[in-house]
Image: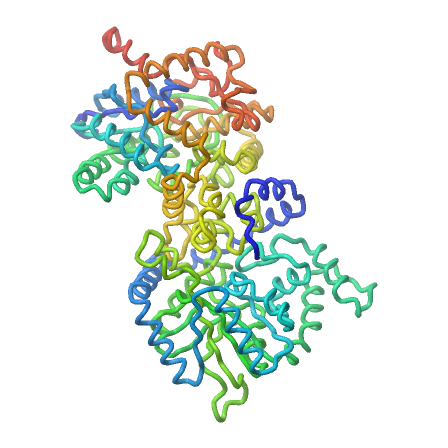
């Protein structure tokens, strides 16, 4: 295992509000990987909703707040390819016209990571201490996949979960139709996309579908349950941290 | 063609309910991406080739004035003539003038998206000249009075049964009891009907995939050979194309051709790649007596040097359409103008105005698939975001959306209030949704719950739970 490291968790706004379990799963996995985890209190959101809506002023204001809140840590890790991609790929673009902030944005981008790829690629994690006897499938969320190259890392770690059998999803790399505000601005198109995704998932005959981004998971879980499918939807970190047995799946009743 | 891009949501709704279209799109969704994938797997240097293609286009665009001048000089030297057209109107007028100068009654046309862009057919017809489309897909939609729904497969929205119906109605002189069940029979019938048209035409109009500065040549690729008949049989050949199609050398064109067919149809090379240089020379066995190139700008020079310049690298291969989940859901007509899919979402606002076409760059999840398959690596999502930035700056976004965004942004910039808010929202929504685990309807999120359930939050925000855990002492 590499040197101990001080990691700041970028919780993400959706995990904070909808599913704190994912945050605690991330903390547990990071600690298993030899990291000390801190959670800067001055964080809210990465600014992506404003950025993707063309509101650069607000996106910059929120991004500056993130840059300040996460200064000084060895690494910044988010349990989301989308939010990590915002920091890693888009902060430098956002501040391309501001020479005084650009170096800070680049410096932050250079030590920011998506959770699962951080565990595998940076911390050299090869296996997790978890068991979950289920047949599952995995959806590759777009930003993690295409902006950050997250593809093999989650499969690699899922392979070490005792009892878990991974069945690949046809068209796993096709967007689920979430797209942030897209899903409410163009609900019918989004519905068509997530209906196709739900049909692909259901056709695999799995008990659970996993992914690394809560936005996509809320979308997929919502469609699966609306269509009456009894397929659990979970963030991959919950399973890797061994917390899936204890916590109801996304959209399932609380015990 | 009058754009209906402003009605994109309504267009999309209609197309989502169009069963024939959905069946046709279902077939296309798997075909093109699979063939492209197989083609690039057979070419290990494909990634390096994309980089080379991008560099060729970037270099040309950085020196566009120079290469266009060289191109014109070489067209003139080989006996052809270049007609510069700033606007669609000027381009149409130039074509009409050439047609009139030779007393043309009918013109045959190879497939050209620029001709669609300037609505050439309607204009020629209004001026007493009959245009006949010779690409099978274009011929079908011309008979049906429909615009193309795809930039290389214009009739992709149709099933063969509809084509058979169209042919029965249009080819009334043929035996009404003939069988038209197979694509092959449909193709043969079109060929039989079109053959005399090729021979009768006074003028042949084609587009161009590339213009070569060093030789003054135009290059077209087709799979049907119709382009060759269109440009060699009539007395006059008019190339209607746009300024960004120029490349410096034949070698450059060859590099881009290797990218084009693989990205478009998954072929290594299109069936016909035809280089035309000037009119028939003394001693040539065939070829037109006159060779004209109508070079359209139509706002493209306005993109040079700005945030949309990269769009001018586009080869019109259609890979971005073929891989786009939004295009796959609604088809090309929903986009409401000539260019659909991701490339249309960037180009259409530039050509018809962002006021008309503002929906198009918004109707994307930014899934990034388009950019990942673009043969010349155009950052399509980034440019769609640039359009959104312009809309936001010009206050073109809906006011309710704007104010919602501003409110959220104000909250996000005040972490103390934000954390208090999420803790309350989480507790309320979590408590009320606890027994079911999800909501079937939420008044403030109807756009979401109309289509899908909304998972109830677990109840407490992460930050409040974390703060508690810190107070208790870790693992305490």
Location of residue A228 in the rendering, given as x and y in whole percent from the top left corner: 60, 24
Location of residue A24 in the rendering, given as x and y in whole percent from the top left corner: 33, 18
Location of residue B199 in the rendering, given as x and y in whole percent from the top left corner: 65, 80
The residue closer to the viewer here, B32 or B327, is B327
- Work out whether A25 lies above or below B160: above
Query: Could one spot residue B332 in this view of the protein?
Result: yes
The residue shown at (47%, 26%) is A218
The residue shown at (43%, 36%) is A140
Query: Could one spot residue B30 in this view of the protein?
Result: no
Q: Quadrant of residue A115?
A: top left
The residue shown at (31%, 30%) is A46
- Work out whether B23 lies above or below A131: below
Location of residue A123 in the rendering, given as x and y in whole percent from the top left corner: 24, 31
The residue shown at (55%, 76%) is B228
Q: Quadrant of residue B149?
A: bottom right
- Work out whether B77 lies above or below B26: below
- Work out whether B418 lies above or below B91: above
Q: Quadrant of residue B420?
A: top left
The quarter in which the N terminus of chain A is drawn is top left
């Amino acid at each position: 295992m590499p040197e101990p490291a001080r990691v700041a968790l970028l919780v993400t706004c959706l995990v904070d509000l909808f599913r704190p379990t994912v945050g605690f799963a991330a903390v547990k996995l990071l600690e298993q990987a030899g990291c000390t985890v801190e959670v800067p209190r001055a964080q809210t959101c990465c600014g992506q909703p404003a950025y993707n809506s063309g509101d650069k002023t607000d996106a910059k204001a929120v991004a500056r707040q993130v840059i300040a809140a996460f200064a000084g840590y060895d690494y910044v890790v988010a349990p989301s390819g989308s939010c990590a991609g915002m920091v890693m790929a888009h902060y430098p673009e956002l501040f391309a016209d501001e020479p005084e902030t650009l170096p800070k944005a680049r410096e932050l981008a250079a030590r920011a990571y998506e959770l699962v790829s951080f565990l595998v690629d940076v911390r050299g994690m090869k296996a997790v201490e978890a068991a979950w006897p289920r047949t599952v499938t995995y959806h590759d969320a777009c930003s993690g996949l295409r902006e950050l190259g997250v593809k093999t890392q989650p499969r690699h770690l899922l392979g070490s979960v005792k009892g878990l059998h991974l069945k690949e999803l046809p068209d796993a790399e096709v967007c689920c139709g979430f797209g942030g505000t897209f899903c409410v601005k163009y609900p019918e198109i989004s519905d068509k996309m997530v209906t196709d995704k739900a049909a692909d998932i259901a056709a695999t005959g799995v008990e659970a579908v996993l992914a690394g981004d809560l936005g996509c998971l809320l979308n997929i879980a919502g469609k699966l349950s609306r269509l009456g499918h009894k397929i659990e939807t979970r963030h991959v970190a919950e399973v890797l941290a061994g917390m899936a047995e204890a916590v109801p799946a996304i959209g399932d009743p609380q015990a | 063609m009058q754009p209906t891009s402003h009605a994109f949501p309504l267009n999309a709704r209609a197309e989502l309910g169009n069963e024939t279209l959905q069946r046709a799109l279902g077939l296309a969704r798997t075909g093109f991406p699979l063939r492209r994938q197989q083609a690039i797997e057979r070419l290990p240097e494909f990634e390096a080739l994309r980089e080379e293609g991008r560099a060729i286009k970037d270099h040309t665009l950085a020196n566009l004035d120079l290469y266009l001048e060289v191109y014109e000089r070489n067209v003139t030297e080989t006996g052809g003539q270049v007609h510069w057209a700033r606007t669609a109107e000027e381009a149409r007028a130039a074509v009409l003038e050439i047609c009139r100068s030779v007393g043309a009654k009918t013109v045959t046309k190879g497939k050209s998206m620029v001709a669609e862009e300037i609505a050439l057919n309607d204009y020629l017809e209004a001026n007493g000249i009959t245009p006949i489309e010779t690409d099978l897909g274009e011929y079908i939609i011309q008979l049906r009075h429909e615009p193309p729904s795809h930039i290389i497969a214009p009739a992709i929205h149709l099933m063969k049964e509809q084509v058979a119906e169209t042919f029965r109605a249009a080819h009334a002189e043929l035996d009404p009891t003939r069988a038209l069940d197979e694509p092959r029979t449909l193709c043969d019938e079109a060929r039989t009907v079109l053959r005399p048209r090729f021979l009768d035409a006074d003028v042949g109009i084609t587009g161009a995939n590339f213009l070569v500065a060093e030789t003054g040549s135009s290059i077209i690729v087709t799979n049907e050979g119709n382009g060759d008949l269109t440009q060699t049989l009539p007395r006059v050949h008019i190339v209607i194309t746009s300024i960004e199609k120029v490349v410096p050398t034949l070698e450059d064109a060859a590099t881009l051709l290797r990218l084009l067919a693989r990205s478009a149809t998954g072929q290594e090379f299109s069936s016909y790649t035809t280089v035309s240089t000037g009119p028939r020379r003394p001693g040539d066995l065939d070829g037109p007596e006159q060779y004209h190139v109508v070079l359209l700008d139509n706002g493209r020079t306005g993109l040079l040097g700005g945030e949309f310049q990269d769009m001018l690298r586009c080869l019109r291969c259609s890979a971005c359409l073929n891989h786009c989940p939004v295009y796959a859901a609604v088809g090309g007509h929903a986009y409401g103008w000539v260019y659909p899919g991701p490339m249309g979402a960037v180009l259409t606002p530039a050509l018809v105005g962002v006021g008309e076409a503002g929906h198009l760059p918004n109707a994307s999840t930014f899934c990034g698939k388009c950019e990942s398959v673009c043969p010349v690596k155009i950052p399509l999502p980034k440019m769609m975001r640039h359009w959104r930035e312009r809309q936001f700056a010009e206050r073109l976004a809906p006011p309710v959306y704007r104010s919602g965004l501003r409110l959220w942004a104000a909250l996000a910039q005040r972490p103390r209030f934000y954390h208090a808010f999420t803790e309350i929202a989480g507790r309320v929504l979590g408590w009320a949704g606890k027994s079911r685990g999800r909501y079937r309807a939420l008044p403030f999120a109807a756009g979401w719950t109309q289509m899908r359930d909304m998972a109830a939050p677990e109840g407490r925000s992460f930050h409040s739970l974390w703060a508690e855990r810190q107070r208790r002492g870790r693992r305490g």
